[in-house]
Amino acid sequence: QVQLVESGGGLVQAGGSLRLSCAASRSISSIWSMGWYRQAPGKQRDLVAAVTSGGSTNYADSVKGRFTISRDNAKNTVYLQMNNLKPEDTAVYYCNAAVQLPGSFFQYWGQGTQVTVSS
């Protein structure tokens, strides 16, 4: 089992930056994928960025070139550096851990952190 705690959200003006952190309750070195998702009011939860245990990354098209995901296995923490923020980035951001099981995956979620970008 993995508990995930996000931090770093807040209110920022358009063009500004924030760094989100996700601290895990145990080692993340063997977790297949760690990622960030976001959900705006009335919309579905969508992938923002993910990084595998091998270091491969995947980004939503809307954040490519602006956001960077990284994982620090020594600190059991995943980060999301968000630059040049836009009002459309406003959402609750959730940390996700995908743990590989025989023939399947199990998803763990944090409680979410609010990011609000003002125009």
Image: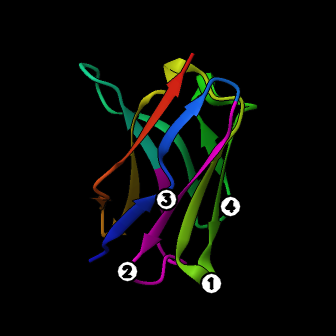
How far across and how far down the image is residue 67, in percent? 67, 39
Tag 4's secondary structure?
A: loop
In this figure, which residue is indicated by the disc labeled 3? 34
Residue farthest toward the top in the current orientation of the protein: 119
Task: For marks 3 and 2, give the CA distance.
Answer: 13 Å
What amino acid type should be assigned to the residue bearing mark 2? Ser
Q: Quadrant of residue 5?
A: bottom left
In this figure, which residue is indicated by the disc labeled 2? 25
Tag 1's secondary structure?
A: helix
Q: Disc 1, disc 3: CB below 8 Å?
A: no
Closer to us: mark 3 or mark 2? 2
Image quarter (top left, top right, bottom left or bottom right) of the C terminus: top right
Task: For marks 4 and 1, give the CA distance.
Answer: 14 Å
Tally the numbered discs. Answer: 4
Taking 58 as reference, is 92 left or right? left
How far across and how far down the image is residue 96, in percent? 39, 55
N-terminal-most mark, 2 or 4: 2
28 in magenta = yes
What amino acid type should be assigned to the residue bearing mark 3? Met
Task: For marks 2 and 1, give the CA distance.
Answer: 12 Å
Closer to us: mark 4 or mark 1? 1
In this figure, which residue is indicated by the disc labeled 1? 74
How far across and how far down the image is residue 102, in percent? 30, 69
What amino acid type should be assigned to the residue bearing mark 4? Gly
Tag 2's secondary structure?
A: loop
Instruction: Give, as a single range, the part of the protein colored magenta.
Output: 16-35
Task: For marks 2 and 4, give the CA distance.
Answer: 20 Å
Taking 13 as reference, is 98 left or right? left
